[in-house]
Image (tube, rainbow, N blue to C red):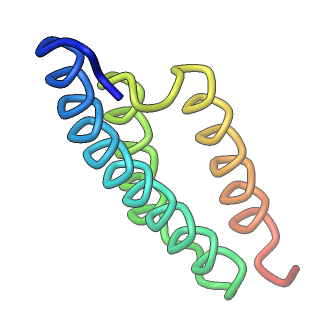
Amino acid sequence: MANTKSAEKRIRANARRALRNKMYRSRVKTAIKKAERAIFAGTPNAELVREAMSLLDRAAVKGIIHKNNAARRKSRLAKKLAKATASPSS
């Protein structure tokens, strides 16, 4: 339990930030899932991939995820899209 007013405020602020970060992380994961679902369904949609990459960049800029984490996930998504568009049969 917090002993000072500033520690109590810190707890409240951390709770608000955690909630906001959770919202952004969830949004990113949903966008990635939608893009991957489209790719694996055989209808690769570059627009969905672009939206997911944009959300990853925004989360990295805000410090919600590390910039290398965002870069890695964007790279994997781009690789999946490239593979799907190169050979639509597989």
- Tell whether 62 sits left or right of 52: left
| 4, 26: nearer the viewer | 4
- Whether 63 is drawn above or below 49: the answer is above
| 56, 62: nearer the viewer | 62
- Tell whether 5 sits left or right of 55: left
Residue 18, picture quadrant = top left
- Tell whether 9 sits left or right of 58: left
Residue at 78% from the left image edge and 59% from the top image edge: 83
- List x then y, in percent, for residue 68: 61, 21
Which quadrant: the N terminus? top left
Residue at 53% from the left image edge and 68% from the top image edge: 35
- Whether 3 is drawn above or below 80: the answer is above
| 2, 63: nearer the viewer | 2
Which quadrant: the C terminus? bottom right
Residue 27, picture quadrant = bottom left
How many callouts does the rendering have? 0
Residue at 67% from the left image edge and 88% from the top image edge: 41
- Whether 47 is drawn above or below 57: the answer is below
- List x then y, in percent, for residue 37: 62, 79
Residue furthest out toward the right:
90
- List x then y, in percent, for residue 54: 36, 43
- Whether 69 is drawn above or below 7: the answer is below
Residue at 37% from the left image edge and 35% from the top image edge: 59
